Amino acid sequence: MSSVAIARRHKLHKGRRVAPGVDPRVDTLVGMVLALTSEVAILRDRVDAHERLAATQTPATPATVDDFVPDEAAQRERAARRQHLIDKVCRPMVAAEAAAAEPEDATDD
Amino acid sequence: MAAPRVHPMMAVSNHDEQSEQQFVVALKSYLFAELDPAVRALSTRTAKDVAHRGGNGAKPSLQDIRRELEGHEIYQHWISAQRAAQELMWQAANDCVDRQRTELDELARTAPALGSVTTNPDFVVPRYLAATDTHMMPGSYHVDPVDGGVRQGAVFDKAASLYSLGRQGGQMNDMRGDTVAAHVYERFPDLAPARILEMGCTIGNSLIAVARAFPQAEVHGIDVGASLLRYAHARAARLGVKLHFTQANAERTDFPDAHFDLVFSSAVLHETSAKAVPRIIAECMRLLRPGGVMVHLEVPFRADEASAHDLVRADYESRFNNEPFWMGAVSADLAGLATRAGFVDVKAGFQDAAFGPPQHGRPAGFGEVNKGGYKSWYLVSGRKPGP
């Protein structure tokens, strides 16, 4: 296998399947939205690092941010924000299920 | 400074990589907490409806349940989102490892001269592993970089604790090895193995735990991937543990007859095939000295006692997480296969997960009760007849 082919194999897994009944475009979009959400989470943590460095008068350079390790309190705050972000992005999936499980229209009762 | 290494070979995560990995864990946890219960409720309801329509009291088949589920939006999202989370997990591990590949290869090259690693450039990967990438890991166990190195092993190690959300022994990922050792202590308390072999050892995470339980033994591991094994060797050597690794197929190795006192595998059989499992058990028989012990640890799930949701989850693992023999392995009569291969004193059951090194003489919880994922494992073990 050529090095180009190997690099491709290290990026994309072999044997990817879409479930019967799933619109492949929706399937792809779910993957793209969650990948983008991952980038938002990373960026939000990076902003957090900038703010915490600023609070200690430390210049925020690529190196100081790359090496920044949040303390426990900061980690808890970050985890809560990450959770909120995921809740927000995934809410429509859960909402669709909740709506489907609701009883039929009761306005005739 | 960046987050510390868990052990000397583990790729170090910088700030953004740490965030990327924490996102994957949070997303997987969210899907488990929020989407999984909805799919569980739907699967249970659907199974009841299908059974009711059947009218003969028979348990509905997975195929019947699945046919109904496929039309539901939540089931479709559950599959898409779980797969996306798994793909993001591998991406996160790849990003972290690829940034420091040169350093990791160098760490492996300069590891202490402890134990050994033997790879085979002509090795043929069994078809059941070559056909798809297990767990969706790009390149799976065996697609190595042209220049060799430890890349696939480093990726596997980095992702392993994210995959199980740290529930298999944290970032050392050694809980399954401790569980195998606990099982041997409990069922075969007199066994004092001089040589041990693990089949399908990947990066040696379980093997280190078993070696710790039997410090006098010469300890070997085999797997199909050269990069995994180079990494496994460097990882063990840098942790000060002497292990020997060989690239080999568990169905037929080059070790002499009656060479080992204990041969085991850990969550490997379900990644093989219906034809391979009896061959692997036969190879265990050949490799063991009379009186030697075989142990296979498997996922804590048996198809015959599974709920509708268990079946739906298992089906996901088989079809979408690229473990096509999962359903076959959890349906197979492993104890019967071992008995037919000539093993005696064969037992199959559930072993409590061991968190930390087990102790001799203390019951470790082997019996018929399945306590569920990450709390129990399904184990089958037996002895080769002889003294």
Image (spheres, rainbow, N blue to C red):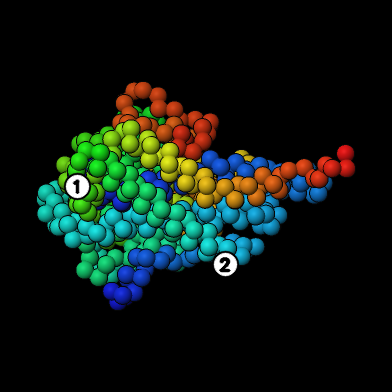
Residue at 33%, 63% in the rendered image: B142
For label 2, the residue is A25
Residue at 81%, 45% in the rendered image: A105
Quadrant including the C terminus of chain B:
top left
Residue at 63%, 51% in the rendered image: B74
Chain at tag 1: A
Residue at 20%, 36% in the rendered image: B216
**Disc 1 packing (10 Å; few <14; some 14–19; many ≥20):** few
Task: Give residue A85's position: percent from left, percent from top.
Answer: 47, 46
Of residues B111 and B102, the one drawn nearer to the viewer in this rendering: B102
Badge 1 and badge 2 in a common chain: yes
Marking on residue B270: none
Seen from this angle, which residue lies furthest top?
B362
Task: Give residue A8's position: percent from left, percent from top.
Answer: 36, 70
Q: Is residue B3 visible?
A: no
Residues at marks 1 and 2, CA–CA distance in whole angstroms:
44 Å
Q: Reply above or below: B258 against A75.
A: below
Q: Amino acid at mark 2?
A: Arg
Q: Amino acid at mark 1?
A: Pro
Q: Secondary structure at mark 1?
A: loop
Q: Along the polypeptide, which appears first: circle 1 or circle 2? A: 2
Marking on residue A59: 1
For residue A109, which quarter of the picture? top right
Q: Is residue B34 visible?
A: yes
